[in-house]
Image (spheres, grey):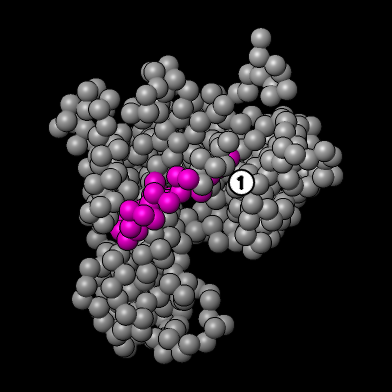
Amino acid sequence: MSIFPRISLRLEVENYLKEGFMNKEVVLAFGKQEAERKFETLLNHLSHPPSFTTVRVNTHLASVQHVKNLLLDELQKQFNGLSVPVLQHPDLQDVLLIPVIGPRKNIKKQQCEAIVGAHCGNAVLRGAHVYVPGIVSASKFMKAGDVVSVYSDIKGKCKKGAKEFDGTKVFLGNGISELSRKEIFSGSPELKGIGIRMTEPLYLSPSFDNVLPNYLFLQNLPSAAVAHILDPQPGEKILDLCAAPGGKTTHIAALMHDEGEVIALDKISNKVKKIKQNALLLGLNSIRAFCFDGTKALKLDMVEDTKGEPPFLPESFDRILLDAPCSGMGQRPNMACSWTLKEVTSYQPLQRKLFTVEPQIGGEGMMGAGLSFEQLKQLQRFDPSVVPLQDVNLDSLRETRVEDIVWMANKDCIGFFIAKFIKCKSIQENDP
């Protein structure tokens, strides 16, 4: 069921996306009216959270069953004894699925209010508590220990430190304030921890803040499918071109049983530090991370190898993963995007510059690129609009078959696509 307005976009951006979505192939296949309905449905889904939280088990340190048992205990504590199921994905064996319960009815709105920024609000809908930097406004009488109704300022119109806000805001649930209004807006740079602990979120989803950090990695389902599709083998040398924060990098290393070498590149030094931190946390030693521009990773005029550091000679790797920078507009939930058309389209030149299937979890690729149906089936597109938005509660879960739950998890996720290319000929081979 839809409870939020569809994602708000600049008109120029919406028209651009609609033109690409409603291309000739799509309109010919479905008709104009159905194509328009599909586009509107997609925009509506983007403003709502996926129906499942997905986490990847670090199988390098522990078995899936062991971690699943630990997670079930943790969820019992977080949800005060409420029994929420945890399912192992049948095709992605190291992925655990946790149903998101909601939207929950009969949550009483409080007189005391706190307004948070849109990014913070999106995180709350995925299970996070409210951290101090995300709080934009709070009622003038708010004290530590007060029950507070939390709202998201989806259009970014609320002024920092305001005592009330009557603009467009979306209710996220209730929580208990850890600090007073005066403390939150004191200007102290040390205040970075939890400001409001969510006790009655609109969508009940677990918090993974410091939960089994050596064993679990919070990762959207399509992202967790990528390394499986790459299919790295022990002993191989793998390149991850745009690797930060290292979710896919560490997944590749784990699938290789930490045997071989995974080279991770990112051009921002702080992000490279994050890759190294995640590798250390997950106990993976086969990862080498470098601060380097991926567009310059290939050096054709080198005579000698650079001792394993970038840039690299042609054909230095067994497999390459390119998760190219993009707009991220498929992330969910996202109720408003203020990006201009110039910003949305700015990634295309970089993606082209960087680019000089089992298991089949997603659907076939989107029509409009001039590919045949057989070629489209070689792509994997994750389109959340193919399933209706629906309420999820524990009673409905108990009556649902496991196969149907997994099917829903595969569909109702973030927007994403994956393409795998297999090299058919070495560049050193001469044409006949």
Q: What is the crowding at mark 1: few (fewer than 14 residues within 10 Å), some, or many (at least 20)? A: some
Apparent side of residue 263 relative to residue 337 in the rendered image (left or right): right
The residue segment tinted magenta is: 322-349
- Residue 25 visible to the viewer: yes
**Residue 227 appears left or right of 369:** right
The one nearer the camera, 377 or 217, is 377
Quadrant placement of the C terminus: top right
Q: Is residue 25 left or right of residue 55?
A: left
Measured as percent of width and height from the top left, residue 344 is found at 38, 52
Amino acid type, residue under disc 1 in the picture: Thr
Residue 201 x, y percent position in the rendering: 36, 61
Residue 263 in picture, x, y percent from top left = 72, 44
The image quarter containing residue 231 is top right
Depicted 151 relative to depicted 276: above or below: below
What residue is shown at x 48% (from left), y 45% (from top)? 349
Q: Magenta includes 348? A: yes
**Could you tell me residue 315's position as x and y percent?**
72, 31
Q: Residue furthest top?
A: 432
Quadrant in the rendering for residue 414: top left
Residues 428 and 236: in front is 428
Q: Regarding mark 1 in the picture, which secondary structure is present there?
A: helix
336 left or right, relative to 240: left
The residue depicted at 46 percent of the width and 75 percent of the height is 133
Q: Residue at x 39, y 59 (%)?
A: 122
State whether residue 171 is above or below residue 61. Answer: below
What predominant SS class does the magenta segment belong to? loop
Q: Is residue 338 magenta?
A: yes
Front one among 388 and 40: 40
Residue 68 in sight from this viewpoint: no
The residue that mark 1 highlights is 295
